[in-house]
């Protein structure tokens, strides 16, 4: 029997690869003769770079960048096995997991480090990019990244505006004198599972700002700052970002990649599976196991497990959803799509237990699931 194991990360506990290894351990305990193929996946957010590099036998390149608060850190970008495609993961330089909860400060949090990653890759000769924009700590419309690539934001007196959300209100003109011209030779694929506009009730600030530290009474102020910035961009580049689908992704990073780097959006999981050549690798599998930290109705809307399921259906391969936590009402709905739906958390394993010893209990549930299948 051949089983392909393709979980996304279990956020806060296990990377996608660690989750896959834990599931494999349980399956092997149930039947040591089972052939297992580990193909961890991601949906464009944190962990996507690792999944793509591992799947293509690529490599990681380390460099020094600034984190969201301007502190120097070590970050990496990925090089795929074709040796020509570079994967930039925004979370590695500008991610919310780089900050303690008390450090979250969206007024000054900057995407500058992501721009530094891009510049470092350009310096090494890369021109073909996949940029994964999930998990950001920023609400700066990607302005920090643009600054790192040479753009100057000027006020009415021709001076650089301050590097904060307040500074966006001061912008009157853009200066491209030092803009990195190598970007014109580059292609940018944006891996993302969000289609929010830049501003408004469904925009970057209103929907995602609070988790980054934007207080309820500040949302309007931030939103208007992004609106003013969008007005300047429309004036200078003749592209309207205000209601552009996906422009609000990652605190507005989507808007910067669209307008200034001519990026094109791709649903994260579909891009990942295509780069992995996933369909070819699963064709003779008897089962596929996928999963994530928590599965619910959102799983059916562009998350990694549904992408895996769609591929599996092409070859009529039964797909098991094994996730950390699934509420009972969601289990019924998900069971209409997956061959089997299994939650690590149940009457005997609490959420706290599952979080503290995630690998142990994920292996245990995989063992129990496959023991029943084989009996």
Image (spheres, helix red, strand yellow):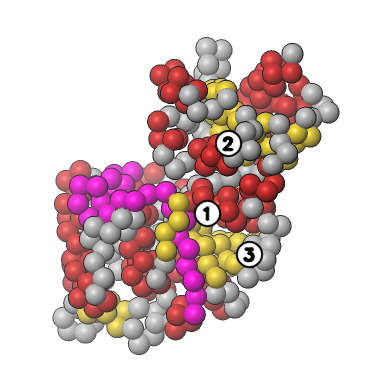
Which segment did they paint magenta?
185-211
Residue 104: x percent and y percent? 36, 50
N-term-proximal mark, 1 vs 3: 3
**Is residue 340 among what the camera can see?**
yes
Image quadrant containing the N terminus: top right
Residue that mark 3 sits on = 79
Is label 1 or label 3 in front? 1
Residue at 16% x, 46% y: name it.
217
Circle 2 residue: 313
Farthest residue, direction right = 33
- Marks 1 and 3 sit apart, C-alpha to C-alpha, by 16 Å
Examine the image and state in which quarter residue 239 appears: bottom left
Percent position of residue 244, x then y: 28, 59
> Which sits earlier in the primary sequence, circle 3 or circle 2?
3
- Mark 2 secondary-structure assignment: helix
Marks 1 and 3 close (CB-CB < 8 Å): no
Question: Taking 248 as reference, is 353 above or below it?
Answer: above
Q: How crowded is mark 2: few (under 14 residues within 10 Å), some or many (20 or more)?
A: few
- Answer with left or right where residue 180 lies relative to residue 76: left
Instruction: Categorize mark 3 by other alpha carbons within 10 Å: few (<14), some (14-19), many (20+).
Output: many
According to the picture, the residue beneath numbered tag 1 turns out to be 271
Q: Which residue is drawn at 71% across and 31% down?
A: 286
Front residue of 278 and 103 = 278
Mark 1 burial class by Cα count in 10 Å: few <14, some 14-19, many 20+: many
Say whether disc 1 or disc 2 marks the residue closer to the N-terminus.
1
The location of residue 341, given as percent across then percent down, is 54, 23
Quadrant location of the C terminus? top right
């Amino acid at each position: 029997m051949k089983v392909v194991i393709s979980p996304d990360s279990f956020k806060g506990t296990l990377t996608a690869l660690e989750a896959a290894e834990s599931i494999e351990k349980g399956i092997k305990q149930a039947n040591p003769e089972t052939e297992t193929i580990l193909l961890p996946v991601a949906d464009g957010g944190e962990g996507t770079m690792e999944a793509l590099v591992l799947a293509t036998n690529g490599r990681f390149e380390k460099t020094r960048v600034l984190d969201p608060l301007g502190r120097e850190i070590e970050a990496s970008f990925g090089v795929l096995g074709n040796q020509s495609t570079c994967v930039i993961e925004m979370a590695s330089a500008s991610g919310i997991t780089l900050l303690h909860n008390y450090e979250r400060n969206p007024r000054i949090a900057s995407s500058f480090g992501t721009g530094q990653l891009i510049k470092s890759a350009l310096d090494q000769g890369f021109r073909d990019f996949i940029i994964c924009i999930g998990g950001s700590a920023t609400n700066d419309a990607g302005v920090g990244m643009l600054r790192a690539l040479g753009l100057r934001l000027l006020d009415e007196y021709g001076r650089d505006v301050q590097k904060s959300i307040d500074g966006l209100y001061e912008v009157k003109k853009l200066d491209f004198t030092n803009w990195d011209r190598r970007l014109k030779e580059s292609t940018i694929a944006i891996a993302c599972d969000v289609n929010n506009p830049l501003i408004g009730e469904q925009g970057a600030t209103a929907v995602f700002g609070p988790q980054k530290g934007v207080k309820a009474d500040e949302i309007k102020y931030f939103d208007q700052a992004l609106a003013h910035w969008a007005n300047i961009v429309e004036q200078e580049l003749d592209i309207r970002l205000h209601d552009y689908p996906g422009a609000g992704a990652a605190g507005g990073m989507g808007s910067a990649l669209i307008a200034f780097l001519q990026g094109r959006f791709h649903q994260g999981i579909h891009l990942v599976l295509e780069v992995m050549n996933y369909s070819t690798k699963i064709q003779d599998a008897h089962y596929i196991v996928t999963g994530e930290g928590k599965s619910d109705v959102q799983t059916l809307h562009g998350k990694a497990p549904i992408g895996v399921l769609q591929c599996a259906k092409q070859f009529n391969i039964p797909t098991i959803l094994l996730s950390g936590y699934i509420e009972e009402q969601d289990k019924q709905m998900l069971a209409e799509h997956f061959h089997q739906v299994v939650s690590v958390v149940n009457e005997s394993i609490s959420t706290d237990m599952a979080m503290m010893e995630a690998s142990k209990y994920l292996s245990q549930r995989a063992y129990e699931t496959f023991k029943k299948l084989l009996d």
